[in-house]
């Protein structure tokens, strides 16, 4: 059995953890998991436990978790990322510290932790409120949303190893990691995973997970069979006057100006262009000279033609921005 250690007021998380452990240890060979809904309607899928164990070992080999002693659960176990952190702790017999799911999860941590998984907003708030705590972490993986260039720049001064993850519920959490401490690095496959492309979209091959020819909607630049640069999603590409524009790439350019969770780049139908680029932001954004600043940071064809502001952007149950529903609210 795993050694569970409670930190602060985390009784609710501890209860959820024991519920998951009961399911993990029962006779069923599968775990039911709801997808995040960030690219479509949420759905429940059944994941074989052996695949979760295989995925845990792939991450463990990449990060050498066999040399580690502890992990921190600070993300929701309702989602695959939280469940997989627990499975990794089980696989490598790590002491599992559990804190509340909080925007600043390290605030009550006063000792070293070998392995932690966070979402970008947690990393951002930790740097704002308790930056010194990051030096207590050995390996930190960031998932759930892209990491802004501003945040990448800020983590360079800390000693912890920080990785961005690439994956989806269907691939049992991540199947590639990108070091954020090495500037201009690419996503690297874990385990025996290899990649090809079809129509510029990534296709995944992972023998350990029983995955063969899984085509994604992720547009990538393939470096080699085990490495790629992520460019955006094909289902979000904007075709404006025959020019294809990836909103994620435009947003990445604007992260030095605006918080990532405060806006999106989308489109509306246009008689002349077919689709015109638009900006949808939250009302809290400073609008003074906003358009002029954005026009400087992006290419000519990427410049938003219209600006919209909402009290807040529409989110999925897992906290990700729901692009489709947010754009529908404008339309």
Image (cartoon, rainbow, N blue to C red):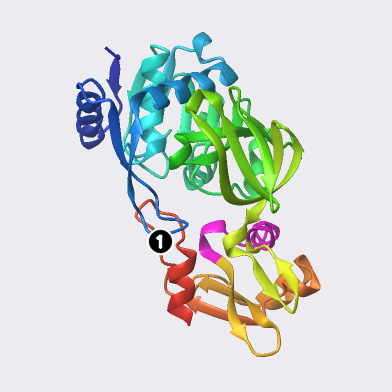
Q: Can residue 161 be seen in this view?
A: yes
Q: Main secondary structure of the magenta part?
A: helix
Q: Which residue is tagged 1?
A: 315
Quarter of the rendering containing residue 46: top left
Pick the front one: 148 or 26: 26
Q: Which residue is drawn at 53% across and 71% down?
A: 281
Relative placement, left or right, of 48 versus 293 is left
Residue furthest front in the image? 212
Pick the front one: 181 or 143: 143
Q: Which residue is drawn at 54% across and 80% down?
A: 308
Q: Which residue is drawn at 48% across and 18% down?
A: 57
Q: How many marks?
A: 1
Horizontal and vertical percent position of residue 212: 55, 34
Q: In which quarter of the image is the N terminus?
A: top left
Q: Which residue is drawn at 42% across and 16% down?
A: 70
Horizontal and vertical percent position of residue 231: 68, 52
Horizontal and vertical percent position of residue 38: 45, 56
In this view, 321 is above or below 106: below
Quarter of the rendering containing residue 188: top right
Pick the front one: 268 or 11: 268
Q: What stretch is highlighted in magenta?
A: 248-263
In this view, 79 is above or below 28: below
Pick the front one: 12 or 329: 329
Relative placement, left or right, of 198 versus 326 is right
Membership of 105 in magenta stretch = no
Q: Can residue 137 be seen in this view?
A: no
């Amino acid at each position: 059995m795993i050694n569970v250690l409670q930190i602060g007021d985390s009784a609710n998380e501890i209860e959820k953890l024991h519920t998951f452990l009961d399911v993990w240890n029962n006779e069923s060979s599968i775990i039911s998991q709801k997808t995040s809904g960030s690219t479509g309607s949420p759905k429940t899928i059944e994941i074989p436990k052996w695949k979760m164990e295989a995925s845990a070992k792939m991450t463990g080999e990449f990060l050498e978790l066999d040399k580690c002693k502890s992990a921190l659960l600070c993300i929701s176990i309702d989602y695959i990322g939280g469940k997989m952190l627990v499975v990794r702790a089980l696989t490598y017999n790590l002491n599992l510290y559990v804190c509340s799911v909080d925007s600043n999860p390290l605030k009550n941590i006063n000792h070293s932790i070998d392995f932690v998984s966070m979402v970008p907003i947690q990393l951002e708030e930790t740097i704002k409120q308790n930056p010194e705590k990051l030096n207590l972490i050995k390996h930190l993986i960031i998932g759930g949303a892209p990491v802004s260039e501003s945040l990448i720049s800020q983590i360079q001064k800390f000693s912890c190893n920080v990785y961005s993850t690439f994956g989806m519920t269907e691939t049992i959490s991540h199947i590639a990691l990108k070091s954020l401490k090495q500037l201009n690095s690419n996503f690297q496959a874990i385990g025996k995973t290899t990649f090809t492309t079809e129509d510029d979209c990534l296709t995944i091959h992972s023998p350990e997970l029983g995955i063969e020819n899984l085509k994604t909607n992720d547009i990538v630049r393939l470096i080699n069979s085990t490495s790629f640069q992520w460019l955006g999603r094909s289902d979000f590409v904007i075709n404006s006057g025959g020019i294809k524009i990836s909103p994620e790439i435009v947003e990445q350019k604007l992260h030095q100006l605006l918080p990532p969770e405060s806006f999106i780049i989308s489109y509306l139908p246009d008689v002349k262009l077919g689709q015109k680029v638009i900006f949808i932001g939250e009302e809290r954004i400073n609008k003074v000279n906003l358009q002029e600043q954005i026009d400087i940071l992006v290419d000519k064809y990427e410049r938003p033609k219209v600006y919209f502001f909402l009290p807040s952007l529409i989110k999925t149950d897992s906290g990700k921005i729901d692009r489709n529903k947010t754009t529908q609210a404008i339309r």
